[in-house]
Image: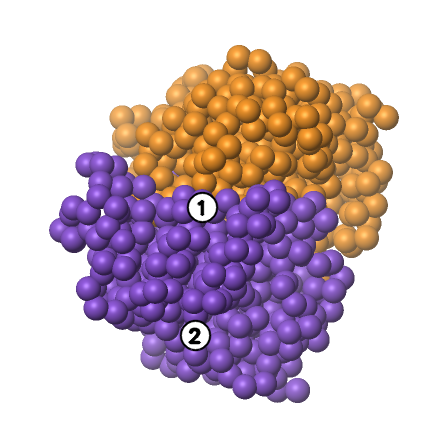
Chain colours: A purple, B orange
């Protein structure tokens, strides 16, 4: 199948108009938010707010109609009422607009005859006028390279993840969440009802897009199951494809039908598709974040053998259960290595357990000991990955671990990674107050700079490691 | 089996000594932390720091030896080195001390002959001297009524949950975490190696303790499987018993053996025990928190029928998948009720879906509409529980939902609960920055005051609701 790189104009338009801005002072509805997002995310071309009354908005001249915009116009964001949309499409066709994105809802997703009729009319008008449609009932595009955006706080920096997201809300939140965890996007598209541009064309485009290293997707339904199956197979053959299937259960599929009018298909068909195509399935946005930081940051480990460096025997026991249940291995160390490890630490330290999992107890702060310990474990070739756990609520004297302690402990671990390039993951958990939240964010920041993946639960780390290793095992054959 | 209420002295001693305090200025090790915790948690009797050099600590007179303490002495906390413990026990026996708790480690959990010999010696000395032991290798007791504590920041307020926790670290953290979520404890005990007082005696005690309404437990091993099986069955027959089994996997069991010297038993035996006894099993401390807030706050619903009030179609679809997968039901509403619901809301509002799940879209802020909607749903008897979702990261204009918006939305939901006593749960999620963390905490606080359970993930809510309803279904027969 040929690549479909002619969606480029969807992600990198040269000019944008936002139809339906209000001129009421102090009012910021969605149209005004789009304008603000384009300004804050530094859209690299002219921005034209549209309102029949003309005037000015956020320092930009407001045009009465898209037809009044000077010069060419590539991309129109529609925030006008559904009933006015057919005329907008006619005007856009006249103006030579390439793509219209509809925040506007009230079409097929309503389940009413009128909604479906209107959607069909708009599609026919667009087709006749040579205009491509995104949506209706969606947030549209976030593309940091061009500065296209739907929220003012999104990073202006590009990355390698592209995200096909049928739900606007899941896109709005997930970009923020993933950004905070160190994920940067190449392109994100929320495409709602998928009346024109849909998951198939997008999957094909991102497969061939050299700026997309990883494809993430939230999909509720399939316009054409066979084409999607073909597209996702081809995509998964060349890059990691991680998919959340919304409407996996029968009740969820019913909800999806009233959300985006999607025909969800059965869980059985979906499971088969995932297995055959080599897609990585995830169930929640948290899991999607965990997988993305793993694919972005973790060097491919040689195997599944994990050394867990923990503090607190109970935490270490529960972590072992979680990792092993997810399919990882915690090999026991030969007595010779345990002797060697004891020699590096203070054997009389309270709570020390020199084993795998390691309960470092009071030795947690002993950077002189734990640094050579980690190196020794990796040098001896008995393990493939170090999992370093930072629990912020486990110190009896402090409601949460003082930031300077956390950073000192962490920097010691980071040193092993940066000096030797070994495979390491960090889990930061036990957040109980604002201070611990801020400490966790500061610690994550240090790991991000060092390119070490951070997880906020052992279960999240375990699941992501298993999926990541499985992916590479399959590719090695 | 007769009740074992003679452990009362373990939780409510009249005087406490802490052996092993340091006199170095500015140094706060674990002994000093115990003293601080007793002071901050308002221990309701005299506190005697012990150090051979005497002196003063935090305004308290330091005694050279437990034998020098004036008057009677009930409870001794040992932070001295393991080798000095036999003499401490002899001194305690002489003084008539009822119980010694060992923070001290370096006994059976070491796996060395010397460690095991020392543990046996200490047990024999204690038995001969009529002294009961907690530990060794543990944090001991948190009992707000008496003010016994091992961390200075624990609440001084009592509650109805008692927590049997073999791991010190899991106890330290979980008390903080649960407290933040609105759980208050009657008694918590971390009992480490369980050389004397163990899970059996504790389970028996809490079964008969009128101050304990719910028993939570983290257990790594069984000193006597048959006795535990009997004890836990009797407990679960009279109150909810929620248990995490640390060392559930083979590798986890090995880790447990080097943590507390526990013989973990097989997963198969454990699963059988859980099923037969009617124990509620959980896998993580987060889940334990979710279950506890449910048992503490939620009125028993009549059934499993949930109405989900959400904002964002994708979020609603994923929530439906999560709830239904956990065993809950989202009944479709009869057309008559959907009409009625539409009449209460603004049918032209963007993104509105009047269905179950409800996607309130822009109507989220429409307190005039959602209040009668919730009441109507409950009045019509078509559902048993309202699940109200508050997503803090879904608003395009704001990096996180402004606190005043979140509180206005929430107060509207709370009003339904407080005015009518209906069954309601609240999910607060999408935390991406410090502001959203603080908003979530403030919102949780309002729900706590109204006695509505709050969860920080839909999956957590779904799991807890299912376990809670299953528990009551079984009891109804």
As drawn, A216 above or below B382: below
Q: Badge 2, how many Cα within 10 Å: few under 14, some, many 20+? A: some
Q: Which residue is mark 1?
A: A82
Q: Residue furthest left?
A: A59
Q: Position of residue B262 (x, y in %)?
A: 68, 51
Distance from Cα at disc 1 to Cα at disc 2: 25 Å
Q: Is residue A4 left or right of residue A58?
A: right
Q: Earlier in the sequence, mark 1 or mark 2?
A: 2
Q: Look at the numbered disc 2 and give the secondary structure of its residue.
A: helix
Q: Position of residue A327 (x, y in %)?
A: 66, 67
Q: Nearer the viewer, residue B384 or A203?
A: A203
Q: Secondary structure at mark 1?
A: helix
Asked if one can make out residue A290 in the rendered structure from this viewpoint, the answer is no
Q: Give me the chain letter of mark 1.
A: A
Kindly indicate the quadrant of the structure image that contains residue B467.
top right
Q: Residue at left 33%, top 30%?
A: B404
Nearer the viewer's eye, disc 1 or disc 2?
A: 1
Q: Nearer the viewer, residue A211 or B190?
A: A211
Location of mark 2 (residue): A7
- In this rendering, position of residue A228 left or right of residue B440: right
Residue A216, percent from left and from top: 51, 67
Q: Quadrant of residue B388?
A: top right
């Amino acid at each position: 199948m040929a690549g479909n790189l002619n969606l480029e104009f969807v992600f990198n338009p040269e000019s944008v108009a936002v139809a339906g801005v209000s001129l009421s002072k102090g009012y910021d509805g969605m149209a005004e938010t789009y304008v603000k997002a384009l300004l804050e995310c530094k859209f690299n071309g002219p921005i034209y707010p549209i309102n029949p009354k003309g005037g000015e908005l956020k320092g930009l001249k407001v045009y009465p109609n898209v037809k009044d915009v000077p010069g060419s116009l590539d991309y129109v964001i529609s925030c006008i009422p559904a009933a006015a949309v057919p005329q907008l499409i006619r005007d856009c066709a006249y103006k030579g607009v390439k793509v219209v994105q509809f925040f506007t809802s009230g079409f097929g997703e309503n389940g009413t005859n009128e909604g479906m009729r209107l959607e069909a009319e708009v599609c026919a008008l667009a087709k006749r006028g040579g205009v491509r449609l995104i949506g209706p009932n969606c947030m549209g595009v976030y593309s940091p390279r061009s500065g296209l955006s739907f929220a003012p706080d999104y990073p202006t920096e590009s990355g390698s993840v592209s995200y096909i997201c049928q739900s606007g809300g899941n896109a709005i939140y997930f970009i923020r969440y993933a950004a905070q965890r160190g994920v940067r996007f190449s392109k994100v598209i929320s495409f709602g009802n998928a009346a024109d541009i849909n998951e198939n064309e997008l999957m094909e485009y991102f497969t061939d897009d050299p700026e997309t290293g990883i494809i993430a997707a939230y999909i509720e339904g399939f316009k054409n199951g066979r084409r999607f199956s073909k597209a996702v197979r081809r995509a998964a053959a060349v890059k990691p494809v991680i998919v959340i299937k919304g409407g996996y259960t029968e009740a969820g599929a019913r909800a999806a039908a009233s959300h985006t009018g999607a025909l969800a298909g059965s869980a059985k068909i979906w499971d088969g598709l995932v297995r055959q195509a080599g897609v990585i399935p995830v169930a929640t946005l948290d899991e999607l974040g965990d997988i993305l930081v793993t694919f972005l940051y973790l060097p491919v480990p040689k195997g599944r053998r994990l050394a867990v460096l923990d503090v607190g025997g109970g935490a270490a026991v529960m972590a072992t259960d979680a990792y092993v249940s997810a399919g990882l291995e915690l090999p026991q160390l030969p007595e010779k290595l345990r002797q060697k490890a004891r020699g590096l630490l203070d054997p009389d330290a309270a709570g020390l357990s020199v084993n795998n999992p390691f309960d470092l107890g009071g030795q947690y702060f002993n950077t002189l000991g734990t640094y050579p310990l980690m190196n020794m474990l990796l040098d001896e070739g008995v393990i493939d990955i170090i999992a370093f756990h930072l629990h912020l609520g486990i110190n009896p004297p402090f409601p949460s671990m003082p930031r300077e302690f956390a950073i000192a402990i962490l920097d010691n671990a980071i040193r092993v990674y940066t000096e030797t390039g070994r495979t390491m993951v960090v889990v930061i958990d036990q957040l109980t107050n604002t201070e611990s939240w801020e400490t966790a964010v500061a610690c994550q920041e240090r790991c991000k700079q060092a390119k070490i993946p951070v997880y906020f639960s052992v279960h999240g780390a375990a699941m992501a490691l298993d999926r990541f290793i499985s992916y590479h095992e399959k590719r090695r054959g």
